[in-house]
Image (cartoon, rainbow, N blue to C red):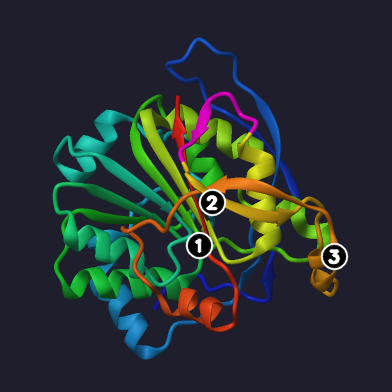
Amino acid sequence: MRGVSDTGRYKRTMHELEEQPTNDTAQPRHEHLVLSFVRRSGRLDARLQRAWDTYADTYLLPLNAGEGSLDIRDDWRLTDDWIRSTWGNDHPLIVEIGTGQGENIVAAAAQHPQTNYLALEVYDPGVAHTMLRAGKQQLGNLRIAQINAPELFAKADTATVNEVWTFFPDPWPKMKHHKRRIVQPALAEAIHRALIPGGLWRIATDIEDYALHVHEIMDARTDFRNTGDVTVSLPTGHVGKGNADLAQDMPHADFVESARFDGRVLTNFEKKGLDAGRVIHDFAYQAI
């Protein structure tokens, strides 16, 4: 069994994240980051515990500052040399933020063996499921890090990542919690620095208010280009949990989004959204 288990709720409010020195000439930024998840007890059943015990040494990267911590070691950076030593090649790297049970990233890794994949997931069952799926196929191009995603990108060298995926992030539906949404200006800045020129940040959500949130964060940026060509109509005001029905009577405006990303498999989570009548919003923002 794992040495430390979570008890109750793991919750941080705000903390200072100071970026470590980079190869860039730009001065480091100090950002107040709000954690985009609440970590609850995620005890593993016998099957997932066996998967953890069998595959952790192969797939789980030792990046954590300590046992049970989601912070990254002070001495670690995402560099080309680290990628080369971890995967043993110079193949392109795709990073997925919040991989859930690993359906998307494992399917992609199996289909594209000449691409390296890094899964970022904080929940124990999701990590175990991903290891189990990858282990069954003996995939050698996938690794997993159980760490807080913004901290990883804050410690990334310039132009080390080809694509970043953020599919169906936690919507944090209450208005007072919208600040916890993972798509934020500070993360966008860090991801832009990590992406190669022309690299993509792909985002998908089935929550209309989150789609508006993405447009507000990303569309006005001069370091990313919205590559979409699909016009959608969205309310121009935000709603929260309990009053989402008000959105339909709000003023609407047209926004540009992307067609469904062919590289995203149709998961049970997405199927449930479609069955509930929700529209899937896809985005592809290109680093410029």
Q: Position of residue 166 (x, y in %)?
A: 48, 54
Image-based side of 58 in relation to 243, left or right: left
Label of residue 148 in the image: 2
What label does residue 122 carry, if any?
1
Disc 2 is placed on an element classified as loop
In terms of secondary structure, where does tag 3 sit? helix
Q: Amino acid at mark 1?
A: Val
Q: Are marks 1 and 2 in contact (CB under 8 Å)?
A: yes
> Can residue 150 be spotted in the picture?
yes
Tell me the residue at 69%/50% (across/down): 213
Per the picture, the main secondary structure of the magenta-coloured stretch is loop
Quadrant (top left, top right, bottom left, bottom right) of the C terminus:
top left
Give the CA separation, mark 3 to mark 2. 37 Å
Q: Residue furthest top?
A: 25
Residues packed near mark 1 inside 10 Å, few (<14), some (14 to 19) or many (20 plus): many
Foreground tag (1 vs 3): 3
Q: Which residues are magenta?
A: 220-227
